[in-house]
Each structure stands twice: as C-alpha cells, then as structure tokens.
Image (cartoon, rainbow, N blue to C red):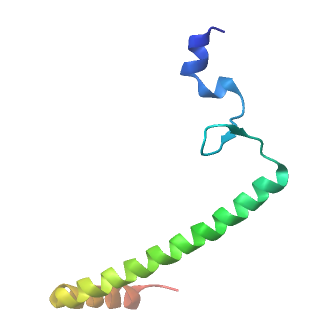
Amino acid sequence: MADGDLRDNPAARGPRERRDAEGAAVATSATGDAEDAQESEAARRRRRAQFLRELHEAKQLRDRVQPRRARAARMRQQMRMRTFRW
C-alpha cells in the first residue's frame, strides 16, 4: 500500500487518536471515554430541550401572526382525529 492510499482512505490508517488544543495526541482511556459519552449525552439532551422550546415558541408565534392558517390547521387536525380508526 502506497502513502497516497493512506491519504485517500482514512479507514486504512487505523483508529484515530484525540488531540488536545495544542495538537498533541491525547491518550484515551476507557473511563475517559465513558465520561465523555455521558457528558455528551447530557449535552445532547440540553440541546434537544432548548431546540424543542424554541420550536414550540416559533409555532406559537406563527399561529399568532397567521390566525386564519392556524384555524384551518386546527380544523384539519380535528378532522384527522375524527376519522382515525383505533
């Protein structure tokens, strides 16, 4: 395998190593990865909650500035619920 193949195929290089702010390689331990995964999970949940709050706020704003469209959407939703079969 030539050097060019390694540049073209990142999977051929093997596992990637993390790097700190200065660019030096940082060894990852099993406990460090678990802490990072848990922290990223908590961060993901916070970002998701923030996104859902902003989405709800945007929908409320749209309903206030377009009352006719909002009323029509409510009527369509009611019709869907009436014709839904359990």
Q: Residue furthest right?
A: 30
Q: Quadrant of residue 6?
A: top right
Image height of 23 relative to 70, above or below: above
Q: Quadrant of residue 38?
A: bottom right
Name the residue rendered at 67%, 25% in the picture: 13
Name the residue rendered at 58%, 67% in the picture: 44
Residue 69, horizontal then vertical, whole percent: 19, 84
Name the residue rendered at 31%, 80% in the picture: 58
Total marks shown come to 0
Q: Residue furthest front?
A: 22
Q: Is residue 29 left or right of residue 53?
A: right
Residue 61, horizontal then vertical, whole percent: 26, 86
Image height of 49 relative to 83, above or below: above
Q: Nearer the viewer, residue 58 or 76?
A: 58
Q: Nearer the viewer, residue 80 or 53?
A: 53
Q: Residue furthest top?
A: 2
Residue 53, horizontal then vertical, whole percent: 44, 81
Residue 30, horizontal then vertical, whole percent: 83, 51
Name the residue rendered at 43%, 85% in the picture: 84
Q: Is residue 13 left or right of residue 77?
A: right
- Quadrant where the N terminus sits is top right
Q: Nearer the viewer, residue 60 or 28?
A: 28
